[in-house]
């Protein structure tokens, strides 16, 4: 642990409905891709700690799954429990919404924020997509009337607009304290975890709307051999038809997915990666609490 950094330190939960840009915001603040992203909802399935250390202090950001109403299977319940659990032990909440859009799921997420009773900053994301900026004013006014927010921050996580100012506002809201993690540490998650996430990201980006929600990834082997990472991964699906789609004609779809995932892993791990991927069927895994736990979906 470094003694050079003094100032403020605290935990900040990033919450909101699916697909408002929570993971993009975390990646932008950290200056590095940590959380996987896609244009599809519910890409994030686990709470991910991102550590930002500066001369002014250390912020422990917790990216969470989107609070949602989609379905009532075991996976959906796990995602909502994970997001709400992050609110139980935090110093500050960033409640992320999409500019000019308010849904029942936003209302549901804000209700969870209100129940937590923790100070909260509203982050209005995707303002770069708003052509008429004056239209933001009534939206901000209405949002401010929904909850006693500490501040309201319009930002563009994708472009970085106002993100640095938001970070300063977050620091100002945190208690004084010494850093918890070493200055160079970025997360508490393992490289094995991120290998699975990067492969799942490719599944989410490459396939149709429903298929990614019926897939998950398990890393069977993660070793360093002769200076390179050797990774064996399983993609679990629920039905034979899903397996056929992922593999594709003569295995071309699976090959393309694995190749791009391997390139992303090499960027993150900064070393050569040998990746082998198989697709297997586990019937109704997303509705089976025991199967979810075996596949790493656990609050422990």
Image (tube, rainbow, N blue to C red):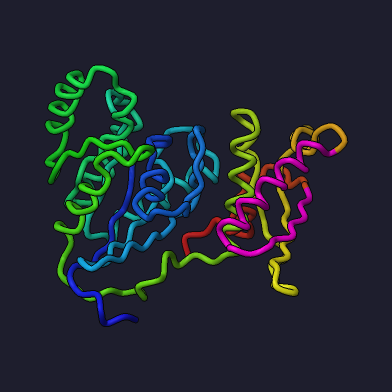
Tell me: residue 71, above or below residue 166: above
Q: How many marks?
A: 0
**Residue occupying image coordinates x 23% and y 67%:** 57
- Is 193 placed left or right of 273 in the picture? left
- Is 125 placed left or right of 45 in the picture? left
- Is 171 placed left or right of 79 in the picture? left
Q: Position of residue 143 (x, y in %)?
A: 18, 30
Tell me: residue 3, above or below residue 287: below
Please indicate, yes or no, whether residue 118 appears anywhere in the rendered image.
no
Q: Position of residue 298 (x, y in %)?
A: 52, 59
Magenta span has 28? Answer: no
Q: Is 225 or 95 nearer to us in this picture?
A: 225
**Start-end of magenta stretch:** 251-278
Magenta-colored segment: predominant secondary structure:
helix
**Residue occupying image coordinates x 63% and y 60%:** 294
**Residue occupying image coordinates x 26% and y 82%:** 3
Please indicate, yes or no, whether residue 265 appears anywhere in the rendered image.
yes
Magenta span has 276? Answer: yes
**Residue occupying image coordinates x 26% and y 59%:** 90
Tell me: residue 53, above or below residue 241: below
């Amino acid at each position: 642990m470094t003694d050079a950094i003094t100032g403020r330190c605290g935990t900040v939960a990033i919450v909101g409905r699916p697909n408002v840009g929570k993971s993009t915001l975390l990646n932008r603040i950290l200056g590095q891709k940590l959380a996987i992203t896609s244009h599809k909802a519910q890409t994030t399935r686990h709470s991910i700690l991102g550590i930002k250390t500066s001369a002014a202090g250390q912020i422990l950001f917790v990216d969470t799954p989107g609070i949602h109403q989609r379905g009532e299977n075991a996976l959906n319940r796990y995602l909502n429990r994970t997001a709400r659990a992050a609110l139980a032990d935090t110093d500050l909440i960033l409640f992320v919404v999409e500019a000019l859009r308010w849904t029942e799921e936003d209302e549901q997420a804000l209700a969870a924020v209100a129940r937590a009773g923790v100070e909260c900053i509203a982050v209005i994301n995707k303002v770069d997509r708003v052509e008429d900026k004056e239209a933001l004013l009534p939206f901000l006014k209405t949002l401010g009337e929904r909850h006693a927010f500490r501040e309201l921050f319009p930002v563009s996580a994708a472009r970085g607009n106002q993100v640095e100012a938001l970070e300063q506002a977050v620091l100002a809201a945190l208690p004084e304290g010494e850093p918890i993690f070493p200055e160079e540490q970025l997360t508490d998650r393992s490289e094995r975890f991120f290998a699975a996430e990067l492969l799942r990201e490719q599944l989410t980006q490459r396939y149709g709307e429903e298929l990614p929600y019926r897939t998950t990834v398990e890393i069977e082997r993660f070793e360093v051999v002769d200076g390179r990472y050797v990774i064996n991964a399983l993609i679990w699906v629920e039905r034979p038809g899903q397996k056929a789609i992922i593999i594709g004609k003569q295995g071309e779809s699976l090959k393309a997915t694995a190749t791009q995932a391997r390139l992303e892993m090499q960027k993150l791990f900064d070393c050569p990666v040998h990746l082998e991927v198989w697709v297997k069927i586990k019937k109704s895994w997303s509705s089976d609490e025991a199967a979810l736990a075996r596949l790493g979906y656990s609050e422990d």
